[in-house]
Amino acid sequence: MEKIYSAERNTSKLAKARPETIQFLLNYSRSMRPVRYKKFVFESNMN
């Protein structure tokens, strides 16, 4: 048991995204607008 938990594992990998993907996600997040009505909050996409 000691050997299983003491071994160092590097299992995390960074995801690589293309610049086009990042630009798309940024533009999408900028187009989201919250609309408040009384106690409710609605998110709408302004496209």
Image (cartoon, rainbow, N blue to C red):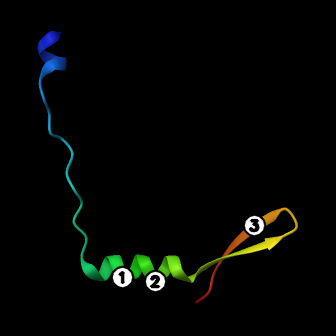
Distance from Cα at disc 3 to Cα at disc 2:
21 Å
Q: Write down the quadrant of residue 33 in the picture.
A: bottom right
Q: Write down the quadrant of residue 24 in the picture.
A: bottom left
Residue at 51% over, 76% down: 29
Q: Position of residue 25 (x, y in %)?
A: 42, 76
Q: Position of residue 45 (x, y in %)?
A: 61, 81
Mark 2 sits on what residue?
A: 27
- Dot 1 or dot 3, earlier in sequence: 1
Q: Residues within 10 Å of mark 3 (few under 14, many from 20)?
A: few
Mark 1 sits on what residue?
A: 23
Q: Position of residue 15 (x, y in %)?
A: 24, 60
Quadrant for the N terminus in the image: top left
Q: Secondary structure at mark 3?
A: strand
> In the image, is 38 to the left or to the right of 35?
right
Q: Residues within 10 Å of mark 2 (few under 14, many from 20)?
A: few
Q: Is residue 17 above or below residue 7?
A: below
Mark 3 sits on what residue?
A: 41
Q: Is residue 12 above or below residue 4?
A: below
Disc 2 vs disc 1: Cβ atoms closer than 8 Å? yes
Q: Amino acid at mark 3?
A: Val
- Dot 3 or dot 2, earlier in sequence: 2
Q: Is residue 12 above or below residue 47?
A: above
Q: Looking at this rendering, what residue extends furthest in the top direction?
A: 1
Q: Amino acid at mark 2?
A: Asn
